[in-house]
Each structure stands twice: as C-alpha cells, then as structure tokens.
Amino acid sequence: MLELKDIVKIYQGGTVNETCLFNGFSLSIPDEQFVCVVGSNGSGKTSLLNIICGTIPIDEGQVLVGGENITHMPEHKRHRRIGRVYQDPARGTCPSMTILENMSMADNKGKPFNLLPCVNRRKTETYRDMLAQLGLGLEDKLGVRVGSLSGGQRQAMALLMSTMTPIEFLILDEHTAALDPKTAEIIMQLTGKIVAEKHLTTIMVTHNLRYAVEYGDRLLMMHQGRAELDLSGAAHKNLRVEDLLCKFNEISIECGN
C-alpha cells in the first residue's frame, strides 16, 4: 500500500509569492489499484506525482510504501520500485541511441554494469518479441535511432521500458497529452493491457475525462491541493463524463470564474 500522511508542501516559502499547495493532505492507495487523477491546472496533480517519486521534497508529513517510511529516500532509489512515463515522449527514451540500446538500458535498470557491455545480444529476440506486441513495427527497427521515431512510437517504447524490470508502481503523467487522438487510443489500450497483466499499482494524471471514466477503478478530482472527489467501486463504475464536467463547472463557479 502507498500512503501519504498529513503532507504539507509550500512553494517559494518565506517570499511574497509563498503558496501552500498541500496542507495536511492524506491519501491511501491499496496494492494493484488503478487511480485516475483529474483536475484543473495548479490543482496539485503533478505535484502529487512528484512527491510520490521524490522529485520534490515535502515540508511536513510522511510517504510510506508497505509501511516503510520513504519520505527522505532519494529519487533514484525510489525509481527502483517505480516506473514513470512523462507527457513528453522524449523524456522516457534516449534519442541518440538505437531501439536495441534503449531496451538494453531499461532492462538493466538498478543493476551494476561494471565493465560489461550494455547490450546483451542474446536478448535481442526477447526484445523483438516484446516490441512486436506493440503492433507498431518497431521489432524490425532495432538498429534505428529512437530520435527518428514518431512521438507515438517513442511513447509506446517509454511505456514498455518503464515496466521491463519488476516495479511496484506505475506513474503516468499525462502520457497521452502530446499525441494525436488515434495514437493516444493505442497508448491507452497498451496501458490498460500492461497494468492488467503485471498487476501494477497505477496512478494516471490525465486531462482526458473519457479516459478517467473508462480506465482504472478509482478517480480523484483535485482542486487546490484537496481531493474534491474520490470515487471507487460502484460510484466509479457508474460515473459519466457529464458528471465530471458538472463538477468542474461547479468548482469553477465557486472560484468566481
């Protein structure tokens, strides 16, 4: 289980621009739950992911995984247990390296390289089979530099690479936002397949309300560092896009917009 307990996060503390985003925020996510997070800009969605991943420090509170306090654990150590896919397809892959080299690097995540070659040619066919499952023809382009691929192909690779080694959590930070609608659908279908097959605890931030309704088994709507909605079970199953739009409009009116 992932737990955030009484989180306080202040940006630009001690200045005239000081902003307290989270003030005593708590959240518990059971193992293997798929949580979709929506909310307006500045509501705390990406900050929530960054706190979990250790990208930004917190001012008060605790982050626990399976009861272990990881609040002060550095980001690189947390990523042994976490796979993260960003909005920008370029952030999850190395453009100057080939597909084979990228796959090899991901496969060696958390392992010592010593003086051994990065690429293990004996695993080439394994990587080819994994890429073939994407249905994008990448299995025939192992020697191609990743920088020459389309955004959708790179994002599919980033998703695959983030889950190649055993992980406990998959963090998806608007990972379809930069893609065209058709490619976004492919990536979401692939996401659902990987999450189900690997039984991953998943947190997905998205601005696509249809994805938030159709995928996952829990929905959080964030606003000013608070969870205005927290729906799971039957409440999530019966949720419609129109319901979320109404809630967004209600919040907007309360804020004077």
Image (spheres, grey):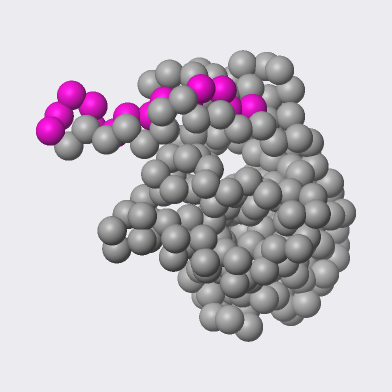
Q: Is residue 177 visible?
A: yes
Quadrant in which the C terminus appears: bottom left
Give the residue displayed 64% in from the left and 27% down from the top: 3
Farthest-out residue, left: 16
- Residue 11 position in % (x across, y down): 29, 33
Q: Would you place residue 46 above or below residue 160 in this image?
A: above
**Front position in the image: 10 or 171:** 10
**Is 214 placed left or right of 47 in the picture?**
right
Give the residue displayed 69% in from the left and 40% down from the top: 169
Quadrant in which the N terminus appears: top right
**Front position in the image: 45 or 252:** 252
Q: Which residues are magenta?
A: 3-16
**Is 171 placed left or right of 224 in the picture?**
right
Give the residue displayed 12% in from the left and 33% down from the top: 16
- Residue 91 position in % (x across, y down): 49, 56
Q: Is residue 107 visible?
A: no
Give the residue displayed 42% in from the left and 56% down from the top: 251
- Residue 233 position in % (x across, y down): 79, 50
- Residue 206 position in % (x across, y down): 55, 60
Q: Would you place residue 179 above or below residue 247 in this image?
A: below
